Amino acid sequence: MCKIPNTKCSICSPLPFLHKYYQPGDLIIAGIMSQISILFNSIDFDKCPSTDLFDDIVVMTQLYQHILALVFAVKEINANLQMLPNLTLGFHIYNSHFSASWTYLASLELLSSYSRFIPNYKCGFQNELAAVIGGPNSDFCLHMASILSNYKIPQLIYGPAPMRNSKTEVAFLNQMFPSIDHQYEGILMLLLHFGWLWTGVLIVNDENGERFLQSVVPKFILRGICFDFIGRFPSISYSTGLMDSVADGLKTFNVAMSSTANVLIIHGEIDSMTLLIMLPAVTEYEDIPIKAKGKVWVMTVQMDFTSLPFQRDQDIDFLHGTLSFTIHSKEVLGFQEFVQMRNPILEKEDGFMRIYWEKTFQCHFPDSEGNTQDGDICTGEEKLETLPGSIFPTSMTGHSYSIYNAVYAVAHALHAMHSSKLKRRVDEGRLKLWNQQMWKLSRLVRNSFFNNSAGEKVYFNQHGELEAAFDIINWVTFPNRSILRVRVGGVDPREPLSKEFTIHEDAIVWPSRFNQALPISLCNDHCHLGYSRTKKEGKPFCCYDCLACPEGKFSNQKDMDDCLQCPEDQYPNNARNACIPKFIIFLTFGEPLGISLAVLALSFSFITASVLGIFVKLKDTPIVKANNWNLTYTLLIFLLLSFLCALLFIGQPQKLTCRLRQTAFGIIFSGAISCVLAKTTIVVLAFMATMPGSKMRKWLGNRLAASIVLSCSLIQVTICTVWLSTSPPFPDFNMHSVMKEIVQECNEGSVTMFYCVLSYMGFLATVSFTVAFLARKLPDSFNEAKFITFSMLVFCSVWLTFVPTYLSTKGKYMVAVEIFSILASSAGLLLCVFSPKLYIIVFRPELNNKEQLRRRNIEIF
């Protein structure tokens, strides 16, 4: 008999409402779990708990499976004689009531002898505490760790990792829960995979919710996810009015339901999300029923949706199509049979089962005195398989799977200790040594590596976190309130990056509102191909307008931030969503424009040659002699060449033709204009020579005309020679001037030299026009200055018009404009200078004599 020295504590006897489950053994694996929430104000540790503290209870029947998973694992280990020979495992399970106070109380009871609440005092070596399994809430695990870590007791928690306050807690706290960061990354990949860029967030207004907002939401925003709203559910406080919390939660929930976002991320923990399940019951007082506002709910694993307290008659259609993250699990052989064989009549030690049975089957057991309440009497013969899955799932859930593995992790660590030097110790001495060495057990738990009965590897990483995957579960509800949980994907950080996230879209059942079409959750419709996004002022970055791509650009993906430029040899199609190869074009002899210009050039060449033939044939007539037949022949030859040089501009550009085009055109036209200038100059000098005492007669003659023509032409030849020597024209492909075509053209090489050639011709034309204009009224019997004036006026007009027209034209039409200018200016010279003479020669030959030429008033047309 153990005596307790110097104690005056009244011993509190166990009470039924404490809901414990105890099985003795050489070593005890304790469980501090939450199944029943009790509405209370406070606990006075100086007094024994009284039933007066409790007003009402909320039973989460689904969480009872957590207890059964621990019991089942212990039963399997004790039946395996190879695991812990000559040792038996027991368990001691407490209900933490989702309360820090009750968690502290349970932790202190574990430090006492069984059924005697004297913390920090235990006598005897039986029922030695080996490890504690706690959960599912992170905060309550932390409360447990703050006490038990001081005693170096290994703790395995199956909820999310709490914020650890000390190195001691880190050393003795092992996480039967994968790194929560992998879950958040999985949620992000899920949103991106389906293109759900416009979402809403519902969190519980507590420290964990704020931590989620501060650490996770910014990461989502950086990856392109934005939020229509961030709603906060009130955290349930059992010291305040529950209906007040429900009313506040309903306001937030209606905001979520009226949101334009079709996808809602729900973040919370099991107890806090009880409020979420209560809301459908009170929506009949609101204008907007929940099930009329179908949304895709994305639930975090912390919620363990299988554990929420659904009622038998509750409509669960609002959960249809939900996607929830759970800890990866596999069905353990024999577990369903073990669960279905449970019976409250036979399992009297189970302090949880009777209240669980009453809540699930809506019946009552007689009290210890045989009294019964109103309603159905529980017989113990009720069948668990008749319960809908929303009330109690018989297949092992993710949290239950973690508890099952946690028990085995402790057993394997104990086996490692038992296989060491301790195996030589026996009986009480052995257990005493176990007690002295138990602090090493936590390290052995963390280093354990084994295959469980489901064939999966179980091991921890360096941070004491279980290396495991998350499953993505699709919830399918049925009118009979049964639930089908379908695994449609997962997140496994152990796989390569390309295989880390998997999703099976065809297996997903969406909420009824979407008629099995993939839900779209965007602030606005996608910008289709051919459009780009532009930001809306005052709206989140996911909200944008769509602008059509400008000319010359395209977009071949949805929601592009900017349109792209096609490669140089391609152009956008009419829809501006793809690029099409450009066609190579140039002015050919086979197209109508090329044929027309070629025929026109050849026609004028033939006319010029005919005029030259007539003048050669009638060279002895007075009208030919009077107009300096040498200059006339030279001018006609230059005009003939100018018409023919226009043909160089038609056809595919080659190296030779490119070099000849502009240079030949410049030299020939300079020669033609210099002939006109020589003619005009001779007319002026001839008039001046007839004046009394004039010395100009000596300048008259063919030598002067030849000098003018040669000198003026030689300057242009020099310019063209320099051009060809320094930067000659060459064949080139112009990709940019025409949108849909590649123009094969002659690149001028040096644009400066090209404009020098044009400028010099303009200078000669200006001088010729000026001289002819001044000599137009000289009293000569055949003064052709006025015709030269008009011809140069036409010439200058053509080329002044050519410059802006040429610069504003694109593609092969630039070449056509230049050809037309060459033909028009040459034709102007031909017609204005030679048509009056031809008229006399052909139609009025009687005027072609000296007598008529001497008459001063002769009319020359």
Image (cartoon, grey):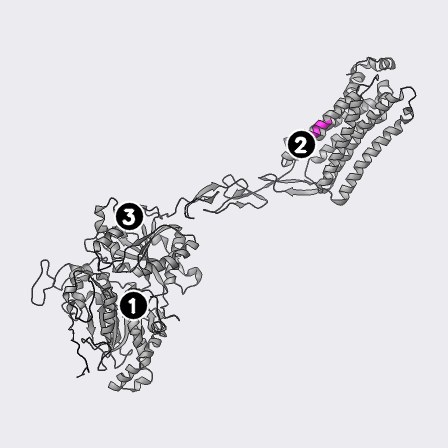
Judged left or right of residue 503, residue 80 is left
Q: Main secondary structure of the magenta part?
A: helix
Q: CA distance from mark 2 to mark 3?
A: 71 Å
Whichever of callouts 1 and 3 sits on the residue coming sooner in the sequence is 1
Identity of the residue drawn at 21% across and 46% down: 285
At label 1, the amino acid type is Cys
Where in the figure is residue 9, as x and y percent of width and height?
17, 76
Quadrant of the image containing the C terminus:
top right
Nearer the camera: disc 1 or disc 2 = 1
- Measured as percent of width and height from the top left, residue 798 is found at 70, 28
Hey, which quadrant is residue 671 in on the image?
A: top right
- Separation of residues labelled 1 and 3 (CA atoms): 33 Å
Q: Earlier in the sequence, mark 1 or mark 2?
A: 1
Residue named by callout 3: 254
In primary-sequence order, the first of circles 2 and 3 is 3
Q: Secondary structure at mark 3?
A: helix
- In the image, residue 696 sits, relative to residue 500, either above or below, namely above
User: Vertically, is 699 above or below 271?
Assistant: above
Task: Kindly check if marks 1 and 3 are in contact, taking CB atoms under 8 A apart as contact.
Answer: no
* Residue farthest toward the left in the current orientation of the protein: 370
Which quadrant does the N terminus fall into?
bottom left
Query: Which residue has dot 1 on it?
Result: 141
User: Vertical placement of 541 versus 335: above or below?
Assistant: above
User: The residue tagged with tag 2: helix, strand or loop?
Assistant: helix
Residue 302 vertical placement versus 446 (above, below): above
Residue under label 2 = 817
In magenta segment, residue 796: yes
Rendered image: mark on residue 628: none
The range drawn in magenta is 795-802
| Mark-to-mark CA distance, 1 and 2 | 88 Å
Does the magenta-highlighted stretch encompass residue 63? no
Where in the figure is residue 95, as x and y percent of width and height?
22, 67
